[in-house]
Image (tube, rainbow, N blue to C red):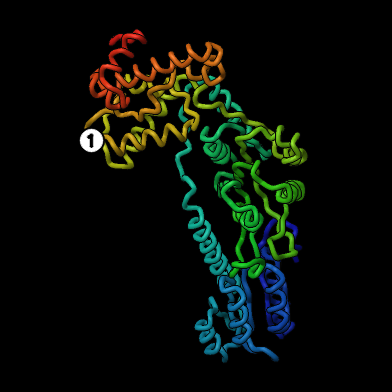
Amino acid sequence: MANGKEERQSRILVVDDDRATRESMEEILEDDYDVVCVADGPSALEKIQKEVFDLVFLDVVMPEMDGIETLRRIKAFDNSLDVIMVSATDRAREATDSIKSGAYDYITKPFDAEVVLHHLENALHKRSLEQEIRYLRSEMALRAGDTRVISQSDSMKAVFRLVGKVAQAASNVLISGESGTGKELIARVIHNGSPRAEHRFVAINCAAIPPELIEAELFGHEKGAFTGAYRQNIGKFEFANRGTIFLDEISSLKLEMQAKLLRFLQEREFTRVGSNRSIKVDIRMVAATNTRLEEMIADGRFRDDLYFRLNVIPIQLPPLRQRKGDIPLLANYFLERFNRRLNKNIRSIEADAMAVLEAYPWPGNIRELENLIERMVVLEADGKAIDEKALPFDLLFHDEASEEDWQGKTVNRGLIEARRAFERQYVLRALRSCGWNQAETARMLKIHRNTLVQKIKSLKIRRGD
């Protein structure tokens, strides 16, 4: 018989007062399933309340508590647990009536091994589909599908080479980078290029789950384990068996949960909340962070032993402002995608608008650019092109040397000179945005037209600038 610490097997509970029937069922099932046998209804209920089972074979006729009453109590405890009734041929009517009480199916004695296995496989397949549907419904916010990485920059080419090497390995990966740089996309590329590609990729944003619920979300919980736990629920780790788990914003985990994650990485097993039974799974771990974990370790907010377990293969993603030449590629890709998705026909992004996009520092990285292009496609009229006038004003007054300024160059000029440079750029971009119409520009800047004329002269702004 399998012991619960091997790779996760479906667990089957056989309930029958006849010893020969129990032994016969165990002989049929034990090669492929983890089988537990009990002789009566009360023992079955006690087992189900303490342990995890995927299916029950339940005899109709038993002393003390018959199969129908046992079935009702099982369903009251866990309605998702399927039960196949077992009866003698002359009691088949009772077995069929049990369907009304929630039984999945029934078989009659004497039974054939192939018949037992056929009914069992059907029931487990149904259970797997139901679990997947529940999971997918809970993951509607998860972005699906397209795992193309759009880039021509040297920094990203180095990332691609590293990803190609690590995809085939089973080692843990830690992806670092600012928010919006595409860490989940890289994790999906690793999964899709790995031997686990036929199995599930399960992404979890650790920062989006309340600390008191994160353990149940990852490891699952038993019915009644906490307030609101009205049914047994498998966790993301169990659901991802043989696939890949992606833990985004790993730095948000509290120290107590870090310790439990470390234990899992060491033992490759966990227990559901409210249970004392270990479940072993085979998953690959990919984690991501937008903070420097080394600094958190120094502050005592992140475990160094967990860091070393996760950081077997580190991948550092560059911010968009350092990916030279990628902004036009990405902007045009998003334009095409949102045209198609929103059934629009925005012709192109004009050169003046593209110049603004390339000059902007993109603190929100690729996600910010994607959101901007979607907004432009929604707001622009069909058949038009996106020009500089269509862009939000906050994009227009960034200095072209934005990255250097972010690092302090502007401060070194002195306050008066820095303010003058900013004001000149602000007014110049406003003029360009309004097609050099001074009256319209003055209204945008909320100043008198004569004041604008004076600013143009004092700041030495010319139409060709």
User: Looking at the rendering, which quadrant does residue 61 occupy?
Assistant: bottom right
In the rendered view, would you say 226 is above or below 186? below
Residue 86 image offset from top left, x and y in percent: 61, 82
Q: Describe the element under mark 1 as helix, strand or loop.
A: loop
Residue 2 image offset from top left, x and y in percent: 74, 63
- Residue named by callout 1: 382
Residue 348 appearing in the image: no
Give the residue type that dot 1 points to. Asp
User: Looking at the rendering, which quadrant does residue 46 occupy?
Assistant: bottom right
In the rendered view, would you say 54 is above or below 267? below
In the rendered view, would you say 102 is above or below 183? below
Given residues 122 and 273, the one toward you in this image is: 273
Residue 88 appearing in the image: yes
Q: Is residue 434 left or right of residue 123?
A: left
Give the mark count. 1
- Residue at 53% across / 76% down in the picture? 104
Given residues 112 and 251, the one toward you in this image is: 251
In the rendered view, would you say 332 is above or below 73? above
- Residue at 59% across / 86% down in the picture? 68
Q: Is residue 440 left or right of residue 95?
A: left
